[in-house]
Amino acid sequence: MHLVYPAVLAVLLFSTGLYGVLARRNAILVLMSVELMLNAVNLNLVAFDVWLNRAARETLHSGQALTLFTIAIAAAEIGIGLAIVLAVHRNRGTSDIDRLRDTAEGHESDAPEAEKAEATA
Amino acid sequence: MTTTTLAVLVPLLPFLGAAAGLLLGRTAPGFVRPLAVLPTFAAFVLAVLVAARQGGGRAVDSATEFTPTGSVPIELALHIDGFAALVAVLVGLVALCVQIYSTGYLRDDPRYPSYAALVSLFTSAMLLVVYSGDLIVLLVGWEVMGICSYFLVGHYWETPEARAASIKAFLVTKLGDVPFLIGLFALGTDASSFRITKILGTVAGGGLHHPTLIALLLLAGVAGKSAQFPLHTWLPDAMAGPTPVSALIHAATMVAAGIYFIARLLPVFQASSAAMVVLAVMAAVTMAGSGFAALAQDDIKRVLAYSTIGQLGYMTGALAVGERGAAVFHLLSHGAFKALLFLAAGVIIHAAGTNSLAAMSRMKDLRARVPDAYWTMTVALLALAAIPPFAGFFSKESVLGAAEHVATGHTEHAPGAAGWIVLLVGLFTALLTASYATRLWLLAFRGHGAEAPDHGKQPRAMNAVLWVLAVPSLAFGLAYGVLPDWFDSRDLTPTLITSVLGTGLALVGGLVTYGAWRHTTALAGRIPLGAVAAHPEADAGLVEAEAIASHEPAYGEVAYAHDPADPGRLLLGPLHRHAAVGFHLDAVYDALFVRPVRAGASLVRFLDREVVETYVRGAGALPRLLGAAVRRAQTGNVQTYVSALLAGTVVLAVAALLVATGA
């Protein structure tokens, strides 16, 4: 199989993920898009690993090893990310990224005092 | 104990008393009075012992150098000759009297602990000046006295007069102290030592390179401290302080420090005849001017302040004719009777509830209210006017005798011109002195009008002290026979011609004033006048503070009263207005120094506010504008940030590609 197929597939996957990260409003969908991007990279890693191996320029399969690392880290990342989204959703009643603008310049929190206290606790 | 140990203890004890008083003042109020009086008493006793041991014989010298300081060495040195021993006894006596008096005078004052501690500190500093054999150590005492004077003049800092007076006293004396410091350095460099004995040795050997310059620089400091023309203006204003402070600092001791300093270093001054003539002219202007001014003052304490300036002028005159024995003799007797005058004036102010002579002259039988003050003050005024056989007569005649001695060319050590100046002006001042002394006595004790208010008896501490001081005022003059042994000086016996002339002029002055008073006193009944303190039952310190504060609203000026019944007004005629304000010297200083400094200050303020701050504000405004622009990018939307990040990455990647391919 020619290297261009997995490469093109990876570009498509990465672009879809990038679009999702930049444009989706739901935090969970953003996280899923991040996973897409990571998997695009994984695909690249595996494909190039095979390609280089066939050319006998590299025989240690370091691309595949790195992919395993990426998968493990992605699993941890998605676990923490989903926990944060869950906590935000419980506190705010929403996980819409457009409405989570606490770091904006001149932002005055319109949340009631009690809610804020809960959030800090 | 050796004499040196005793002498070290003399300044040390009041210092320790002051430190303890300042520390314990709030926590243990019961100890404040003993801590104020006992160390001073011990210092007095020790000073007497030191004087007895020294006995006018060879000077006691002792020195130790703590650490080498490079160039000219500074040593902790004692130099106790007859002058030092006797002046220390005077300082101890007056300080003791003042401390005892203050326990009564300020008995209800909440700030008494700090006051007593400062008086002790002051006493210690003065004793240090007296005993010190090293000029830098002397300077330490000299400056400590200055700062104590500042604090004590401003004791009633609630009143604007006291605040202004304390700052004025400090600044004017500092004006003299700066040249004084330079003069000391010049002297130390020339003699390559600050030890008085070594300096005198250098002078005797002709080793002084710039005698005139050094003498004139030192003279500036002396003029400031001893209130000599033209730096005397702080002294009358310093009367805003409590009366015991006036008695201690501004009559008997601190102002005498300048005279004492010249007396110690007289050979330095004698090395330059120009300095001696300047000294004589300064003394003459001071004596005559202060005599006129004293005759026109309405505040009883200001009369005494100007008379202090005048008597210090006599001492300066004696020094100008090279007779330090006479100067210190007058210093001692003047210290006793002037302290007595001030303390008695404090009693009178308390009893009358006013410090205005015009108001007192409208009170009948004031003398019956304060019999002790009446009699002792009469003694002191007779001493001031130099009527025989009181102390002032002998000391003043010794000054005039010395001036005559020089004027007639009997000696080599002073220019004849100085002798004539001092002699003639001194005789004229004798007339003025007697005149204002008489005026003070008549106005204070021979008033007509309403009965003087009865505020009960004065505290016993205050009255007893008056009698203690009355003894030297009465009898100290008879010591003229023994003093030359102490002072290694010429005979101090009054000479016949100057005695007759001086006493005659004094009598003339007194009688003329009496005549004028008889003439004007009838007017007193017709024009009511007078401001009295709001709380006459309170302790004397408060009464005095209120009296001073009420003077200006009642009369329009702090020194002057529009009283046609004042004999001084008749005697001085058109001069009276000018004399009352000290011959406008304050106005001159105002125009010469105060206003330029103020104008400079407002210029600096303008530059600071309008110019410097504009730059500062401009420097701050630009970053703030940029910051506001950048802050707009902070929308809070994470996706916008990531988009910007992506755009940046793409741009960088394209740029890197372009560079890599060499396009």
Image (cartoon, coloured by chain):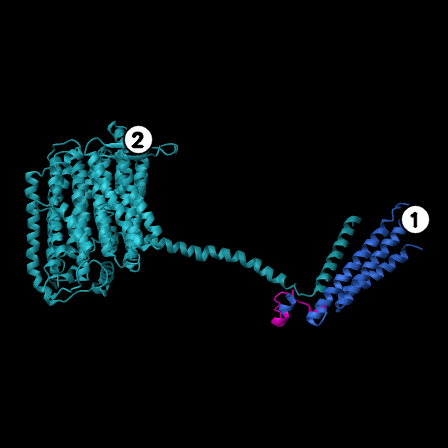
Chain in blue in the render: A
For mark 1, what is the residue?
Answer: A54
Residue B552: numbered disc: none
Q: Residue furthest right?
A: A1
Residue B515 in which image quadrant? bottom left
Q: Quadrant of the C terminus of chain A?
A: bottom right
Q: Quadrant of the N terminus of chain A?
A: bottom right
Position of B189 compared to B484: left or right? Answer: right
Is B283 rendered above or below residue B154?
above
Residue B191: numbered disc: 2
Total number of numbered discs in the rendering: 2
Residue sitting at 88 percent across and 51 percent down?
A49
Locate residue B167, reporting x and y percent.
31, 53
- The residues colored magenta run A97-115
Can the viewer see residue B569 in this picture?
A: no
Q: Secondary structure at mark 1?
A: helix
Residue sitting at 6 percent across and 60 percent down?
B519
Chain in cyan in the render: B
Locate residue B385, reporting x and y percent.
11, 48
Is B90 rendered above or below residue B166?
above
